[in-house]
Image (spheres, grey):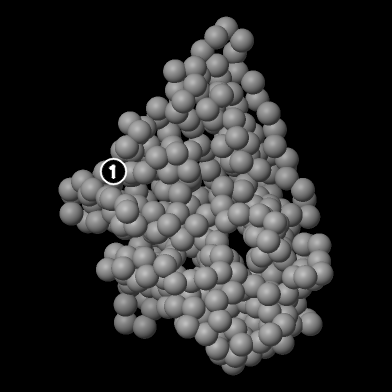
Amino acid sequence: MVTLRYGIIGCGMMGQEHLRNIALLKDAEIAAIFEPDAEMRARSKALAPAAEFVGSIAELVKRQDIDCLLIASPNDKHLGQLEEIAAIRPLPVLVEKPLFTNPADTSRVAELRKRYTAPIWVAMEYRYMPPVTRLIESVNAATGGVKMLTIREHRYPFLEKVGDWNRFNERTGGTLVEKCCHFFDLMRHIAGSDPVRVMASGGQAVNHLDERIGNRTPDIWDHAYAIVDFKSGLRAMLELCMFAEGSKYQEEISAVGPSGKIECHVPGPGRFWPAHLGPAPVAQVIVSPRDPAGPRTLEVPVDPELLAAGDHNGSTFYQHQRFAEVVRGKGKVEVSLADGWWAAAMGMAAQESARTGQSVTIADPFV
């Protein structure tokens, strides 16, 4: 194929970020869009004026001018939409996280994995943030083999989305699924090992307590700690706070082993940086060996055009570059359906642990 033609399912906030980044790809374009919300259709039309709008997923998938699909609909729609596509015409698909939201649906994921005949790539943008990628590439050399891994995210509350779907556990899977499956994926990816036990504590302390949506108050959590034990012996911890606006760095990742430590500091989206504090910080990676050489700090700037295209430090663009290579038959899926299951399942285990006060064991369902 000379030009890669995308079909888009869902053009809310994240879908529009995908549209902006696809527009930056060489030899790629948006052919058609399915988006039920009128306001989101208007916004996506401004970003992809040549795209045609269709009335259903079936109509989109049956179009012979579509080479691949992007799913960026609300969380609770992802698995069912993949199943609908599978029944009509399996196409290469990049599906936003989380892959699923209900622990009872593991068997559906396993069945989809067996019968979907085209590549499925689960979107995990955090892997492709340039400073995080640099850490991943250097982690074993810097640490001599990771033994402890810590991820901290201090950020702003959940943003408003269509129909307020992200305000309720029932539609998102809960904060530790919706927000944190990225981080659980990073843990497992860096560990090179599967988790065996998850322990967590979390809840809703500050955000959305005074909001009323219909006759309900949002129940989405805004802070948590989670600890994960891996088969390899690695121990990992997540610290999440979603009422920490104005933090210099939104994400801080630290990996430590017998030879030293490596960490990266990632600023949040530039549009949220307080202007009175001066220029926004630049992402950095710090390597601290145990020898007398001392720490080395490397700044990892991101192309301003990519920063302007989304809220994920250019990662959405880099992820699409790799996905496009898969569609063209020149690359391999880097975040598989199984990876997507693990990331969501770890978040669900953390939600359950925090709810019950008990540790939760977790095992590979695909063995």
Residue 267 in view: yes
Question: In the figure, is residue 136 to the left or right of 107?
Answer: right
Task: Name the foreground residue: 81 vs 126.
Answer: 81
Q: Look at the image and tell me in which quarter the C terminus lies.
A: bottom left
Q: Quadrant of residue 196?
A: top left
How many C-alpha atoms fall within 10 Å of the one at disc 1: few (<14), some, or many (≥20)? some
Q: Residue visible at 66% across and 43% down?
A: 130
Please, is residue 276 above or below residue 81 in the view?
Answer: above
Q: Secondary structure at mark 1?
A: strand
Question: In the figure, is residue 124 to the left or right of 307?
Answer: left
Q: Quadrant of residue 237?
A: top left
Task: Name the foreground residue: 111 vs 60.
Answer: 111
Q: Look at the image and tell me in which quarter the N terminus lies.
A: bottom right
Q: Residue visible at 40% across and 29% down?
A: 148
Kind of residue at disc 1 = Val
x, y percent for residue 160: 51, 70
Task: Name the foreground residue: 190 vs 53.
Answer: 190
x, y percent for residue 185: 45, 49
Please, is residue 210 above or below residue 87 in the view?
Answer: above
Q: Mark 1 — residue?
A: 196
Please, is residue 188 above or below residue 142 in the view?
Answer: below
Question: In the figure, is residue 13 to the left or right of 212?
Answer: right
Residue 167 in view: no
Direction top: furthest residue: 292
x, y percent for residue 193: 40, 40
Q: Residue visible at 55% across and 9% down?
A: 291
